[in-house]
Amino acid sequence: MIKIRKELISQYLNFFKLKKHAIISGASLIPENDPTVLFTTAGMHPLVPFLLGQPHPAGKRLVNVQKCLRTGDIDDVGDNFHHTFFEMLGNWSLGDYFKEEAIKMSFEFLTNVLQIPKEKLAVSIFEGDDDIETDYESAEIWKRYGLSEDKIVFMPKEYNWWGPAGETGPCGPDTEMFYYVGASKPIKESNPKTKPNEWCEIWNDVFMQYNKTKSGKYEELKQKNVDTGMGVERTLTILQGLKDNYMTEIFLPAIDRICVLSKKRYGFNQEDTRAMRIIADHIRAAVFILGDNSHIPPSNLGQGYVLRRLIRRAIRYGMKLGIKTDFCSLLAPIFIDYYKEDYPELEKNKNFILNELDREESKFKEVIEKGLKEFEKIKKKSEKIINGHDAFILFSSYGFPIELTKELAKESGLEVEEYGFNQEFKEHQKLSRAATKGTFKSGLIDNSEQTTKLHTATHLLHQALRNVLGDKVKQKGSNITSERLRFDFSFDRKLTHDELKEIEKIVNDQIKNGFDVKREEMTIEQAKKQGALAFFDAKYGEKVSVYSIGDFSKEVCTGPHVTNIGKLGHFKIQKEDAVAAGIRRIKAVLE
């Protein structure tokens, strides 16, 4: 029986390596070139270009472990199994094997490698609707591998269908695998549909079989893919015979520290136990956001907003437990030490992590007591709803994220007028509303013609910056929509007007040259020897795609590119400003 997280991950990667899958590196928690999401939400997220048909340098069979973060289930955090940050094991077929082989490998790994008795397994399958027929094929495959018919259930799209992420794109049915967590042995009448509380989902095989068109029709895809996901935390828990993720090696040291700080026992009181879980979960998530090499601090926008929300929510639950001292930076080293071997960036950025946690905790504690008093005043004058203006005052004057106000209101039987809040918060409306409602869809990258042009232009901009400012310039991130590009890079001062004009001129001169964009596959070491820029190095040394634009630019990349830069049009810089200490940002367009 698997005892530790590392063993589970190793077993999974090695199993699929034997099945001719290439082990690829996990991507950053902060996605590049995808404005549809704030964080990497699933293992498939960084692989979108390849799921759409671009050849992957490592081949058609891939496997990895990926850091993920989702806020959609944040209200469920505090139960036995839900988390905001988690690790996901995944294997993919890019137009290679499909349902039969995917299910066969899933069954073999669960029963042979993890040694789970098949009597403790159940699966759900897409039941069909007016658009797509029932997935009888998957059901028959599971039966052939000996799964009992009463443990194969058909469920609607809400449960057993993936995508498309937007209105159009790849999508398809999935089959979810469950482990029995009920008392004694599963009876015939028990399955994930009839008694969902007795079953814990541990793995999901998605069959990307269709393309949904703008007219709402579903067409069979030429390249059919398999995308799977298995949660490390949940799987480790059930393999150890536990019913609580927070009792595994991953969380137990942090829970023990919280018990000491709060002088309370875990598992003794339901409310206290929930608070301890939320604190442990949120501090771990904050460690991974702060530990990313993007150096994102808490703020009122985007990823920084989610980070601030997590930290402040943890602090509030610490106060509910009666913790008197600052505690965030006391818990963070527990997770840094545990994960640093697999994610060395955490140790590298340890000072940044601890300093930002201390700063945010100090800042919030300065105002939270006053804010709570203000909330009590607002509560007394509110009958059923807290108006948007009062909610905004709590945010702007006391640093209360709207979610905190909503939680406080809910505890008092009140609601919050979110529309009014958002009206007073217009400049932040789009991102704050997304963070509030957890609607960070794990969407497909916009591979429109204009987005492809703008992405290609970032290569020219990157090299032009290095030509003008020197080799210390390194890409720190990018965000591209169909209207503009946003490019973050390392530099320690504001650029002059003349420097910006020179950068613009270099890019436009290259566009006039009309070079072809050439793609080659090679190892990361070969790419570096050839002078390719590669600041997001692959972890396992697999092959990468290298894009060259004449003799001007050579860069490791996975995004979409034009075939010739003469198509780009005129490049114009709109704005250049600071993002964080030592990091600048350029916004530019193609006219």
Image (tube, rainbow, N blue to C red):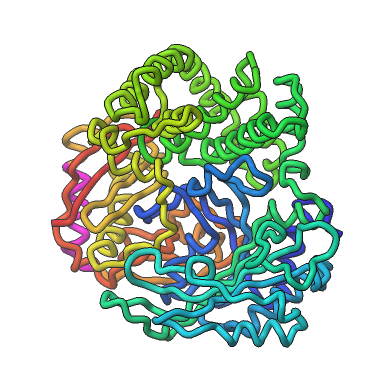
Q: Residue at x 59, y 83 (%)?
A: 97
Q: How many marks do you count on the picture?
A: 0
Q: Quadrant of the N terminus?
A: bottom right
Residue 277: say if magenta: no
Q: Reply above or below: 511 against 394.
A: below
Q: Residue furthest front?
A: 383
Q: Is residue 314 above or below residue 373?
A: below
Q: Quadrant of the C terminus?
A: bottom left
Q: Residue at x 27, y 42 (%)?
A: 586
Q: In which quadrant of the rendered view does residue 122 lie?
A: bottom right
Q: Nearer the viewer, residue 241 or 288?
A: 241
Say which of 445 and 497 sits in front: 445
Residue extent of the magenta highlight: 501-514
**Location of residue 99 with respect to 246 vertically, above or below:** below
Residue 311: x and y in percent read 52, 30
Q: Is residue 582 left or right of residue 549?
A: right
Give above or below for 10 relative to 375.
below
Magenta span has 510?
Answer: yes
Q: Residue at x 40, y 47 (%)?
A: 477
Q: Residue at x 49, y 81 (%)?
A: 224
Examine the image and state in which quarter residue 61 appears. bottom right
Q: Could you say which is closer to the camera, residue 90 or residue 424?
A: 424
